[in-house]
Image (spheres, grey):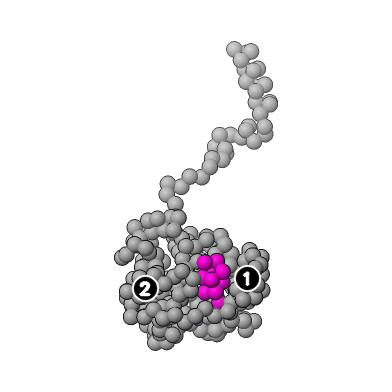
Amino acid sequence: MKHALLMLLAVFAFLPAGCSKPIAYVSLPYRPVSEPLIQQYVAGTSVENRAIEYMVLGNGNDVILILAAIHGSEQAGIPLVLQLSKYLQENPGLLDGHKVVLVPIANPDGVVHNYRFNARGVDLNRNFFAADIDETESAENAVFAEPENSALEKIIRQYKPCRIVTIHQPLACIDYDGPGELIAAAMAEHCPLPVRKLGARPASLGSFAGVILDIPIITVELTEEDSLLSPAALWNLYGRTLLAAIVYPDRL
Ligand SMILES: [Zn+2]
């Protein structure tokens, strides 16, 4: 008995310090019962130091990025994206196989000042890596001088969306860049906005994501009057349009 006790003490003497902690302090890997349905993150900060927040819902391999208010004076998309987040949390079956990344306010300084540009007067939707500048250089090396562009670029690189929806005003149509025509058509079935090809503007998100990265990107141009609608009314008009982009190629 005495011999066994001595052996036990000897074993403890050779254990690393961390192993001699009382069992209650041994850290076990944290295994939640289920993943939380929504996770919130900050992708970066604006010129005036406002957080550029985004949410991730679902855990599927089919990733959809939806953003609003890259032009700060085009704000109707913000409540629409927030309504979408609420609806998806209430209807998680829509997330089966999908991961939805939502950026409700891509240009927080512009929104605060009700200003199209960022706080340095830069149009963020004309400030992405431009195909016509140097197509031969890898987009991996793209440098974005404005922090709001960098934040979006970081999200795109990290999540590698299969399609992107960006919400603007006031041109009242659904536009697309890259291989996005069929998605645009599927979305237009659910709202009064027609599909209309506006053409990719140099260094726009459409050019960067759609043309350079070959990601289908849909630009939803709401109307000017949509700014007057309540979040619920916006959702009634355009909710299914956004859901159509999420479930694509399935139909609602
Ligand atoms: Zn715009």
Q: Label 2 near label 1: C-beta < 8 Å?
A: no
Point out the tag, 1 or 2, that comes first from the N-terminus: 1
Query: Can residue 26 be seen?
Result: yes
Up/down of 8 relative to 165, above or below: above
Most common secondary structure along the magenta stretch: helix
Q: Which mark is residue 84?
A: none
Q: Which mark is residue 185?
A: 2
Q: Is 87 in front, or is 163?
A: 163
The mark total stands at 2
Under tag 2, what secondary structure? helix
Relative horizontal placement of residue 23, taking residue 78 as reference (left or right): right
For the point 37% across and 64% down, the residue is 248
Q: Is 84 in front, or is 138?
A: 138
For the point 47% across and 62% down, the residue is 162
* Residue 201: quarter of image: bottom right
Residue where numbered disc 1 is placed = 135
Residue 199 lies within the magenta run: no
Indicate the amino acid at tag 2.
Ala
Q: Residues within 10 Å of mark 2 (few under 14, many from 20)?
A: some
Magenta highlight range: 204-214
Residue 171, given in percent of the width and then of the height, sits at 44, 85
Q: Is 176 in front, or is 19?
A: 176
Instruction: Indicate the quadrant containing the C terminus: top left, top right, bottom left or bottom right.
Output: bottom left
Under tag 1, what secondary structure? loop
Q: Residues within 10 Å of mark 1 (few under 14, many from 20)?
A: few
The reply to whether the residue tagged 2 has its Cβ within 8 angstroms of ligand 1 is no
The reply to whether the residue tagged 1 has its Cβ within 8 angstroms of ligand 1 is no
Spatial CA span between label 1 and label 2: 29 Å
* Residue 223: quarter of image: bottom left
Between marks 1 and 2 in the image, the one whose residue lies nearer the viewer: 1
Indicate the amino acid at tag 1.
Glu
